[in-house]
Amino acid sequence: MSVLLRTDGVHKAYGGVRALDDCTVEIGEGEVAGLIGPNGSGKTTLFNVITGYAKADAGEVYLGGRRITNIAPDKVFALGIGRTFQLTRIFASLTVMENMLVASSRHRHRRASARKRAMEQLEFVGIAGHHAAPAGTLSYGQRKLLELAYVLVAEPEIVLLDEPAGGVNLTLVNHIAGRIRDLNAAGVTFLIVEHNMEFVMGLCDQVTVLDSGTVVAAGPPGIVRTDRRVLDAYLGEDLDAEDLEAAEEALEPRAGEDA
Amino acid sequence: MDRSVLTIEGLVAGYGGGDVLRGVSLEVAQGGITCVVGPNGAGKSTLMAAISGLLRPRLGSMVLDGENLVGRSPRQILRLGVVQVPQNHSLFRDMTVRENIELGGYILSDRALVTRRAAAVFDVFPQIAGWAGQKAGSLSGGQQRLVEFARALMLEPRLLLLDEPSMGLAPKIGRTVFDAVRQMNAAGTTILLVEQNARAGLRLSSHGVVMESGRVRLSGTGREVLENPEIGALYLGGALEESKDSQG
C-alpha cells in the first residue's frame, strides 16, 4: 500500500510547551486510520499542522509525493485534504443547503449542478430532510454530519475527522461509522481523532498513538491496545520512590484521631 | 470501613438530551483522599459539577453528613462545606496572593475570622507565605494551583473537590501539586480528587474509583484499583493481554 499522507519529524511549540516533538506519522492510501492519545498529546495540533491552520516549526508534511508543509488551509483543502473540527464550524444562520453551496462555491461547480450534488451529499449523510432549515437548528450530531457533507463537496482523497463521535448519541455514532465505511469502500482515506475507543478500535485498520507530541506506538488496533507504552501514556507516570514513601506515610492513620 | 462524609447513590445527570452520569454510586471516606479516574468522557467533571450544584441531577441522591445535596444551589452547597477548585485557573491575576486567598472567605462575615483562617492556611502551605504580596498573575501555573488550594481552605471545607489539578502542568510541577494535595489531607481535609494521571492520583489516595461511560466500573483502596489489570481495558476498550505474541 502506498503512503498517501506523511508527516516527517514535525515539531511545533506554543510558548515553552512542545505540542509536537519529532512527530512522524504515515497514512496508507485507502486506510481508515485512527489517531489516539491522552488529552494534550498533540492530536489536534497535528491536524492543524497538516491542514495549514498551524505552522510547523520544523519537519515536513507530504501528500502523495508532494510537499505541502505550511501552505494555506484553502490550498490544502483544494489539494484533497478535507477536515472536520472538534467543535463544528458551520454558518448557523444560513440554511443547511446554503452551507453546502458555500463549500461548493470554492470548487468551480456550476450553480445548478452544485445544488444537485449538494443534495446528493446531504442524502448520503442522512440530513437531506433538513436542507431548508437554518443550520443552527440542527442537533449536535447532525451538525457533524453537515460538516462531513460539506467536506465531501471537494471530493477529498483523505478526510481528517476530529472527534466525529464526541458528544453524539449511539445511534448516530453507528450511522457515522457506516458512512465512513461506505466512503472508504469508494476509495476515500480517513484519519480519525477520537476518544471513543470502541469506535476507533472497531473502525480503524491502523491506529497511531501520540503521547507528549511523539508517536509511541502504531499498528493494528489489537496490537496497539495491548502495547505497554500505550497504557503508560493513558495512565500517566507513577510517583517515584521518594514520592511513594511520602504517600505511604500520608496514608497512615493519624495518631490521636477519632475514627 | 471509614465513615463516609458523602454518599452518592444512583446518580443520573447530563446536558441537553443525553445522560453523562448513568447511575453513579460511590462513597467519600471521612479524612481520606478519594481519587476518581477514567478515560475522556467517563463523566468525571460532570460528577464534580453535580456535587457542587452547578448541574442538577435527574435522578439519584447525594447525602453529605445527613443533608441531601440534590436540588440545592451551588451557594447553599458551598455553605454546607463543599468547596471546589475548578479545572481552569481561576485567580484574580491583578490582585495579590494574599488578597486572592482572603477572597476565599468572602461568605464569612467576621473579618477577624478571615484573618485567623488566612493565618491557618499559611500554616498548611508555608511555601506560599513568601509570595503573599505578589500579583497572582506573576506566579507560575503550579504556584497558582497552590494558591487556589489555599483559597479553598479558607472555608475549612468538609469536602474539598479538586478537578484535575495537575492538568497542563509539567510532570515535575505536577509532583508539587500532588505534594500539596497530601499536605491538605494531612492537615485534616477530606478530598475528592479527579485526576488525569491515574497512576499518580491513585498512588497518593486512600480510595480509588474508575469511571467509564458514566458508570463506576472499579473501586477499592487506591492501591487495589491501581493494581487491578482491568484498568487498562477500561481506558483502551479491550482486554489487556500480554503483548509477547505481537512483537516484531
Image (cartoon, rainbow, N blue to C red):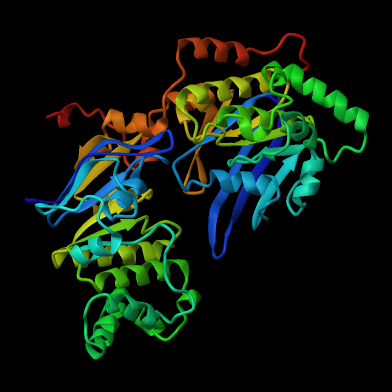
In the image, is residue A241 above or below residue B242?
Answer: above
* Residue A223 can be seen in this image: no
Residue B126 is left or right of residue A99, and the answer is right
Q: Residue at x 77, y 42 (%)?
A: B78
* Residue with the most extreme left position: A1
In the image, is residue B21 above or below residue B179?
Answer: below
Q: Residue at x 72, y 19 (%)?
A: B129
**Image quarter (top left, top right, bottom left or bottom right) of the N terminus of chain B:** top right
The spot of residue B59 in percent (x, y) is: 65, 55
Total number of numbered discs in the rendering? 0
* Near-viewer residue (A239 or A228): A239
In the image, is residue A36 above or below residue A136?
Answer: above
Residue A50 is left or right of residue B18, and the answer is left
Q: Please tell me in which quadrant of the rendered image residue B208 appears.
A: top right
Q: Please tell me in which quadrant of the rendered image residue B63 appears.
A: top right
**Image quarter (top left, top right, bottom left or bottom right) of the C terminus of chain B:** top left
Q: Residue at x 46, y 10 (%)?
A: A241
The spot of residue A214 in percent (x, y) is: 29, 35
In the image, is residue B15 above or below residue A99?
Answer: above
* Residue A97 can be seen in this image: yes
Q: Residue at x 28, y 78 (%)?
A: A104
The spot of residue B139 in percent (x, y) is: 61, 29
The spot of residue B45 in percent (x, y) is: 57, 45
* Near-viewer residue (B55 or B138): B138
